[in-house]
Amino acid sequence: MSTENLENEGKEVAKNLKNKRNETLDQLKDTTSEITDAAKEKAEELKEEATELFENAKGKISETFSDENIDKAKEKLQDLKAEATEKVNEFTEDAKEVFSDVSEKASELAGDVSENLMDIAEDAKEELQEVKTKTKNFFQRLFGK
C-alpha cells in the first residue's frame, strides 16, 4: 500500500469519524431540545389546568356555599395549587437533570471521538514512517547504496 493511499485512507477515516461525531452531537442536541420543549410545554399545561380548575371551583363555590365554606375551599384550592406547582417544579428539575446528563454524555462522546481521531492520526503517522523506512531500505538494498 503506498504512502499516499495510507495517508488518504487515514484522512478518510478521520473525516468519517468527524462526520459521525457531528451527526451524534446534532442528534443529542435535537433530543435535548425536544425534551426541554416537552418539559416546558407540560409544565405550562399543568399550570393552566391547575389555574382553570381553581377558577372553576372558585366560581361554583361562590354560587353554592357561604363565605365560611368559600374560605375553606379557597384554602384547600391554594394547597392544591401549591402541590401542582411543586409537581411542575419537580418535573422541570427532572427535565433539567436529563438535559444536564445528555450534555455531559455529548461532551464525553466528543472527547472520546477527538481522542480516537488523535489515536488514528498518530497510528497513520507511524504507519507512514514505517512505510517510508521500509521503502528507503528497499531502494538502498536494490541499488546497493
Image: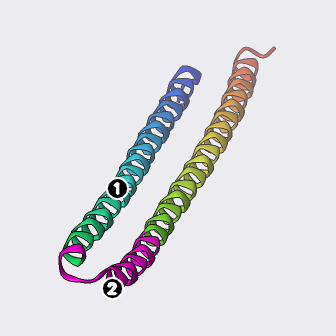
**Residue of label 1:** 44
Most prominent secondary structure in the magenta stretch? helix
Q: Position of residue 27 (x, y in %)?
A: 39, 45
Q: Earlier in the sequence, mark 1 or mark 2?
A: 1
The residue shown at (72%, 28%) is 129
Q: Quadrant of the C terminus?
A: top right
Label 1 close to label 2 by CB (< 8 Å): no
Residue situated furthest right in the rendering: 145
Q: Nearer the viewer, residue 84 or 39?
A: 84
Could you tell me which secondary element the residue under label 1 belongs to? helix
Query: Could you say which quadrant of the image residue 61 lies in?
Result: bottom left
- Residue 69's tag is 2
Q: Is residue 58 magenta?
A: no
Counting other residues with Cα less than 10 Å from the Cα at mark 2, is it few (<14), some (14-19), or many (20 or more)?
A: few
Q: Position of residue 98 (x, y in %)?
A: 50, 61
Span shown in magenta: 62-84
Three-letter code for the amino acid on which mark 1 is drawn: Glu
- Residue 118's tag is none
Residue situated furthest front in the rendering: 67
Quick check: 45 left or right of 78?
A: left
Give the number of callouts. Answer: 2
Q: Position of residue 4 (x, y in %)?
A: 55, 20
Three-letter code for the amino acid on which mark 2 is drawn: Asn
The residue shown at (36%, 49%) is 37
Q: Nearer the viewer, residue 52 or 102?
A: 52
Q: Is residue 63 magenta?
A: yes
Query: Could you say which quadrant of the image residue 126 lies in?
Result: top right
- 29 lies above or below 84: above
- 40 lies above or below 46: above
